[in-house]
Structures are given as structure tokens and as C-alpha cells.
Image (cartoon, helix red, strand yellow):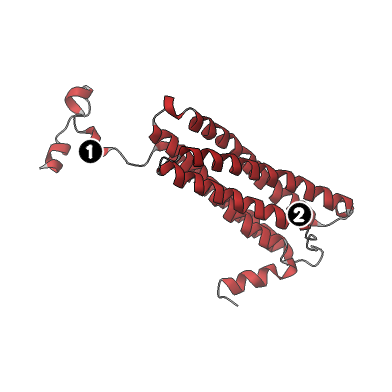
């Protein structure tokens, strides 16, 4: 009966007459969540293409791997902790433990800023080692990959700031909206963490990158 009632409706009539059953069509996924997922798909494809470019260039002898600054390991650990902190904020918000959510959000922001500062310092390490003066395509790819990832994390901090503001003003807002904002930030950080872990492994796997990927894919 619901099916026949829906197809018999007249969408060209005013809302009160023709769209009485509009609620039956609404999606449970907020538009912001859908937009974020679409954006993350585009970002993932972008970094996938960078991966393909890097793997292709590693087949050439002149592409010497970039040395591994010790700060990169520390930076990776910071980003992992930031992602964990946001997961803590998400869980706390769902349980209405807002004090914990505030603490977790502040920790996530501080750790992300520490990650970005660490990335800049790792660039400085390579400058001090003289690698930016060497003609090596790997240096250019290193700057491109880490720079683009850093810009995406910087953009994430803008969303983080807005989310943190919503948590502090939650009494003036719908809690559902606040929780959705935290969920979106958490998803964003998790995806960019996975992207970074993949790119981090590729950047420092040396000229065996292609062989490693073939082994992981079960081709070799």
C-alpha cells in the first residue's frame, strides 16, 4: 500500500498536498557526511596517482631514495596519537562525556600541529644535509607528497577548530550536529593517517618499492 501511495503522489503540487510522504524518501546520512566521503575518495585517488608516479620513477637508477630523517618516525607517531585522540573524542561524545571529548579534541589538535611542525623540521634536516642541492627526482617527489599531505592536514585543522568551538558551545546547538561534526573530523583523520602510513612506507622503501608492491599484491 505504501508503494502505491508513493507513486500516486503529485510532486508538482504544493508541499502540503503533494509531498506529504516526503519523509519516506529522506536519507539517514547527513549531507555533510556524504560530501566528506566524496572528498576523501578524491583525495585517496590523488595520493594513489602520486604513488603510481613514485613507483614508476623508482624503476630508474638515477632516482636515489631520500634519506630517512629520524623526525619522520616521530611525526608518524604524533599523527597516530592524534587519530587515537579523535576516536576518544568521538566515543566520549556518544556517551555524553563532554569533558573527555573536550580534552581529547585539544590533544588531537596539539598533536596534529606537532606533526606539521615536525614535517617542516624534517625538511630542514634534509636542507642541512645538503640533499636539496643534489639533482635527484626523489627529492621533488618527497616535497610534493609530504607537502600535499601537510596541506590536507592543515585544512583539517580548520574543521577541527570549528568542531572544537561547537563542543564548547554545545548548549546553544543540537547535540546531534555536534556529534556529527566530531564524527566527520575523526573519519578525516583516520583516512589521512592511512594515506600517510602508505606514503611513508613508499618514500623510504628504496629502489625496491616496485618489488614490494608486487609481493604485497601476490604478483611476485
The answer to whether residue 13 is visible is no
Residue 72: x percent and y percent? 73, 55
Separation of marks 2 and 1 at Cα, in angstroms: 53 Å
Q: To which quarter of the image does residue 57 belong?
A: bottom right
Q: Nearer the viewer, mark 2 or mark 1?
A: 2
Residue 59: x percent and y percent? 73, 67
Residue 179: x percent and y percent? 43, 38
Image point (56%, 71%), residue name: 217
Q: Which residue is mark 1?
A: 24
Please tell me how crowded label 1 is: few (under 14), some (14-19), or many (20+) other residues with Cα within 10 Å: few
The answer to whether residue 92 is visible is yes
Outermost residue on the left side: it is: 1
Q: Nearer the viewer, residue 16 or 4?
A: 16
Q: Secondary structure at mark 1?
A: helix
Q: Nearer the viewer, residue 145 or 176?
A: 176
Q: To which quarter of the image does residue 156 belong?
A: top right
Q: Secondary structure at mark 2?
A: helix
Residue 45: x percent and y percent? 56, 52
The quarter in which the N terminus is drawn is top left
Which mark, by number, is residue 71?
Answer: 2
Amino acid at each position: 500500500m505504501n508503494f502505491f501511495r508513493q507513486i500516486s503522489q503529485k510532486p508538482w503540487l504544493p508541499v502540503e498536498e503533494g509531498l506529504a510522504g516526503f519523509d519516506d524518501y529522506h536519507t539517514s546520512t547527513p549531507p555533510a557526511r556524504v560530501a566528506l566521503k566524496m572528498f576523501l575518495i578524491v583525495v585517496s585517488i590523488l595520493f594513489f596517482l602520486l604513488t603510481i608516479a613514485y613507483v614508476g620513477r623508482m624503476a630508474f637508477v638515477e632516482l636515489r631514495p631520500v634519506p630517512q630523517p629520524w623526525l619522520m618516525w616521530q611525526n608518524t607517531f604524533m599523527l597516530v596519537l592524534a587519530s587515537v585522540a579523535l576516536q576518544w573524542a568521538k566515543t566520549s561524545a556518544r556517551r555524553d562525556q563532554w569533558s573527555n571529548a573536550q580534552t581529547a579534541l585539544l590533544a588531537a589538535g596539539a598533536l596534529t600541529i606537532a606533526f606539521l611542525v615536525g614535517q617542516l623540521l624534517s625538511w630542514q634536516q634534509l636542507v642541512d644535509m645538503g640533499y636539496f642541492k643534489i639533482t635527484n627526482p626523489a627529492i621533488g617527489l618527497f616535497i610534493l607528497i609530504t607537502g600535499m599531505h601537510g596541506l590536507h592536514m592543515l585544512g583539517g585543522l580548520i574543521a577541527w577548530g570549528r568542531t572544537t568551538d561547537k563542543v564548547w558551545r554545545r548548549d546553544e546547538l543540537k547535540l546531534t550536529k555536534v556529534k556529527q561534526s566530531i564524527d566527520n573530523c575523526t573519519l578525516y583523520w583516520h583516512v589521512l593517517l592511512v594515506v600517510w602510513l602508505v606514503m611513508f612506507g613508499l618514500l623510504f622503501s628504496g629502489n625496491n618499492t616496485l618489488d614490494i608492491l608486487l609481493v604485497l599484491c601476490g604478483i611476485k
